[in-house]
Image (cartoon, rainbow, N blue to C red):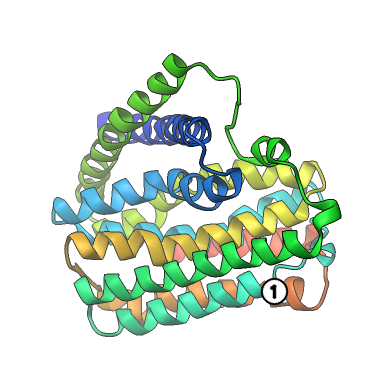
Amino acid sequence: MMPWLLSVLGLVILLLAGDALVKGAVNLSLRVGIPALIVSLTIVAFGTSAPELLISVNAVLDDKPGLALGNVVGSNTANILMVLGVPAILSVLHTSECDTRKTYVFMLVASVLFIGLAFLGEFTLVSGLILLAALAFVLTDAFLEAGRHRSANAALALSEADGIEEVEGADPDMPWWQISVFLVLGLVGLPLGADLLVDNASIIARQYGVSDTVIGLTLVALGTSLPELATTVMAALRKQADVALGNVIGSNMFNLLAIIGITAVIGPIPVDPEFLRFDLWVMLAASLLIVPFVFFKQDIGRVWGVILTGLYVAYVVIVLS
């Protein structure tokens, strides 16, 4: 039981430390004059992906690359099937009112690029730099798009104060000591939580005779998708389908380009042949399942919620078997 308890403890520490780091970094950045838009597109995005990043980096440094790759591929599959499926069961996601087409196309291109590099047999330094270059392109396009949108809608443009309020974890009145506490908790907690989770997840894998890859695809991936699930459930209950869909698409794109990109720069990530035969194609198929909701203005109703969730349960059963 101890490895399970320590794995859960590691996951809890990761999630709390990631949240603390986001709050501290956001408010530090705003205090020193970095615009709210830039903070939301960079610091918040990196901060909320910090648990996945730390797990992947630790896994590679500990010579458990299957755990690193399984975490990202499993998280992306869970984000589409479970993170959209469960909230849709609770409340219809009115995705017909959203326009996420451009970001969704970027995510599909990132998925195809990722799969293409995987078929080289290993994510190397060059592979990592290619993924990070794609990430830089996406972020640059987001900055330019935001600038064009604000210029074209000057009368409706948000004030800087409004922009700050929309940034996750922002509190313009947060004192310096509290910012420092959040930063310290985040910077200390993330590596501690990642180390606990990676080490004990590997022990569990050995106990049950499964590989680090399988644990990454299931236990670790499911755990690191919990923040996205919580965000999407709240967005669904508040009738904010654009937030729900945008959260999933953005998270998946960031996982592929940033997490594996940075991790591959630190150390090579060999690709288990099983990924090439099954898991990568499941990830891509799951991504293609939401085409009707992105391009044909359909809502994700409860029936679709049950279908998506059921497909995820079936996938986990197949992986574990």
Task: Determine whether the residue tagged by mark 1 lies in a helix, strand or loop.
Answer: helix
Q: Is 215 displayed left or right of 125 in the figure? A: right
Q: Is residue 168 above or below residue 64?
A: above
Residue at horizontal 51 percent and vertical 80 percent from the top? 109
Q: Is residue 56 above or below residue 117?
A: above
Q: Position of residue 127 (x, y in %)?
A: 27, 76
Rate crowding at label 1 as few (under 14), some (14 to 19) or many (20 or more) other CA atoms within 10 Å: few
- What residue is shown with label 1? 101
Q: For residue 191, what is the image quadrant?
A: top left
Give the amino acid at mark 1: Arg
**Does residue 103 appear in the picture of this structure?**
yes
Q: Position of residue 269 (x, y in %)?
A: 21, 67
Q: Position of residue 257 (x, y in %)?
A: 40, 67
Q: Which residue is at the front of the view, 82 or 113?
A: 113
Q: Which residue is at the front of the view, 121 or 316?
A: 121
Q: For residue 277, what is the image quadrant?
A: bottom left
Q: Which residue is at the front of the view, 48 or 212?
A: 48
Q: Is 235 displayed left or right of 249 in the figure? A: right
Residue at horizontal 42 percent and vertical 73 percent from the top? 134
Residue at horizontal 24 percent and vertical 65 percent from the top? 264
Q: Which residue is at the front of the view, 68 or 304?
A: 68
**The C terminus appears in which quarter of the rendering?**
bottom left
